[in-house]
Amino acid sequence: MNQMILALILFIIMYVLLLRFSDRRWQIALIFAAIFVVLGILPLSHVLPAINWNVILMLAGTMLVVAFFIDSRMPARLAEKLLKVVPNVRAAVVALCIFAGLISAFVDNVATVLMIAPVALAVCKQLQTNPVPVIIAIAASSNLQGAATLVGDTTSILLGEYAGMSFNDFFWFHGRPGIAFAVEAGGLMTIPVLLYIFRKEKKPVTSSVTTVVNDYVPSFLMLGIIGGLIFASQFPNKPELTNGCICMGLGIAGMIYETIRTHSTKTALAAVQSVDYQTLLLLSGLFIVIEGITEAGVIDAIADVFVGLAGDSLLEMYLMIVFVSVGLSAFIDNIPYVATMLPVVQGISELMGIEPYLLYYGLLIGATLGGNLTPVGASANIAGIGILQKNGYTVTTKDFVRIGVPLTLTAVSVGALVIWTVWA
């Protein structure tokens, strides 16, 4: 059998299994990575170089720091202060959603939901208000801003590493506004949508700041990651693992600090246990498989199909990538999708003779925001629904779609228009 066809068949089977067995994704990815090596599609010597260690280190280090940040209770205190200045439930929901969006630009979306959802639940309980639409709105808002910065979402890290983009490049790149402005424009336009959805929630809010922050060092570590990545971005020829070492170094520094502060390894070990190792292993397996299908010529073939469908129309190609990404991300995890599509987009750009950044941004906007169309389209949605279910609330697909669809369509349309205006 032709090696390219074999690689494509294996890749399709892997993707089907990833969709069917979502709780076994990392094992599936590693098994198929091994199959690619055993069948000779990818030489054994290419396995370790295929894994993007900079991405792995960035994710692991950031996860450690986020664990300390949450444990310090700083996010809960910030949310309480925010609620203190709003007049009613509608304004409180919008304020919490904006806060979730801002936090998620720098912290993993799931972690953002875990930080803010308990505060929202407490407020809703106090006011005897249904928390289901509130938590859904917070989860959806956390997904809207993840693509704004290099560290906001795993997909952003993947793009930054693949395209050689620094932290600053997400804000200003090649003399033009970067993707952050498009993401923020889309996020801002969802505020009127939220105000309309929660237009009947006019009960007054009475809140006090009761959470005590037990340690400010994790907050400085979070700022250290952002500042370190900004500083490193000033050096174009820096070593390949620089960003990963910055994030991992600060994560390890947090572990050492917590061990000294508490005279125990309990907090540090809890942070280590909180790291999402399954995502790290999933990405490692995907990197190997994607390298295998690239060497087999599958990526080039997929790029040819896209170009064949859109012809020489850049607008048609751009819209196809954006809205295909939105549709697929509503049902499949955007991490393997973006990891697969980045080299495809690169191949499309080469075939069309254009720079790839417009299409990169369209891919990221569609894939990152498309998850809000369904309850299972993004990990933050699943986390938010899980919190509601643990507290005895039932969440229907109708409940989710009523909020997720208008937010998604608004943010994607505005973000895609801004990107096209600036980069086309």
Image (tube, helix red, strand yellow):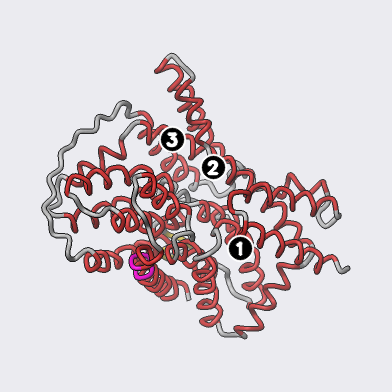
Does the magenta-highlighted stretch encompass residue 144? no
Judged by its main secondary structure, the magenta piece is helix
Question: In the rendered view, does 85 fall on the left or right side of 105?
Answer: left
**Whole-Å distance between the Cαs marked 1 and 2?**
19 Å
Does the magenta-highlighted stretch encompass residue 405? yes
Badge 1 density bin: few <14, some 14–19, many ≥20, Cα 10 Å: many
Identify which amino acid the numbered label 2 is placed on.
Answer: Met
Identify which amino acid the numbered label 1 is placed on.
Answer: Leu
Q: Quadrant of residue 54?
A: top right
Disc 2 or 3, which lies upstream in sequence?
Answer: 2
Q: Is residue 371 above or below residue 406?
A: above
- Mark 2, secondary structure of its residue: helix
| In front: label 3 or label 1 | 3
Q: Nearer the viewer, residue 368 or 318?
A: 368
Q: Circle 1 sits on which residue?
A: 342
Which residue is pictured at 67% across the width and 52% down the height? 287
Q: Circle 2 sits on which residue?
A: 58
Q: Circle 3 sits on which residue?
A: 67
Question: In the rendered view, does 332 fall on the left or right side of 172?
Answer: right
Q: Are marks 2 and 3 in contact (CB under 8 Å)?
A: no
Which mark identifies residue 94? none
Disc 1 or 2, which lies upstream in sequence?
Answer: 2
Q: Is residue 13 above or below residue 260?
A: below
Identify which amino acid the numbered label 3 is placed on.
Answer: Ala
Residue 385 % position (x, y): 40, 52
**Whole-Å distance between the Cαs marked 3 and 1?**
30 Å
Magenta stretch in the rendered image: 402-406
Badge 2 density bin: few <14, some 14–19, many ≥20, Cα 10 Å: many
Residue 215 % position (x, y): 32, 26
